[in-house]
Amino acid sequence: MNEFLETEEQVLRMLKTVFDPEIPVNIYDLGLIYRIDISDYGVCYIDMTLTSPMCPASDFLMEDIRQKVGTVEGIKQVNVNLVFEPEWNKDMMSEEAKLELGFL
């Protein structure tokens, strides 16, 4: 596997360790991650949303992402961009997340 794909896989693994304190499912499986882009210079750009624009955990989640993804070898900086379009809905969750939350 090439170095870029390994780094991307490690970033995904780290994102799957970030949980909204109110929901027992990681943010990746919840469908909150819209984009991951890693530059040649080690900057990781992440576009994410929240289940609700008024989510009280937004600062916590963004800092948790920065800290965890920042530990991945080759990542020098993590930029998290909070977006609200497209608006998040339950259909964006993985099958595992839907099962865990009782939607299946």
Image: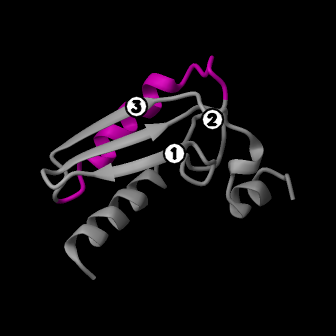
Q: CA distance from mark 2 to mark 1?
A: 9 Å
Q: Badges 2 and 1: C-beta atoms under 8 Å apart?
A: yes
Asked if the residue at tag 3 contacts the one at tag 1, i.e. Cβ–Cβ closer than 8 Å, the answer is no
| Earlier sequence position, callout 2 versus callout 3 | 3
Return the residue nearer the eye: 2 or 26.
2
Residue 59: give x, y in percent of width and height. 44, 23
Q: Is residue 102 left or right of residue 2?
A: right
Residue drawn at the location 55% of the way across and 46% of the way down: 27
At label 1, the amino acid type is: Tyr
What range of the chain is rendered magenta?
52-73
Q: Which mark is residue 86?
A: 2
Residue at left offset 41%, top offset 61% = 13
Residue of label 3: 81
Q: Which residue carries the number 1 mark?
A: 34
**Residue 2 image offset from top left, x and y in percent:** 23, 78
Disc 2 residue type? Pro
The tag on residue 59 is none
Task: Say what secondary structure mark 1 lies in.
Answer: strand
Which residue shows up at 73% across the image and 39% down it?
Answer: 89
Identity of the amino acid at label 3? Asn
Q: Looking at the image, which residue sits at the far front?
A: 86
Q: Is residue 10 above or below residue 19?
A: below
The Cα–Cα distance between marks 2 and 3, rounded to whole angstroms, is 14 Å
Residue 50 placement (x, y as % from top left): 59, 31
Q: Is residue 51 above or below residue 54?
A: below
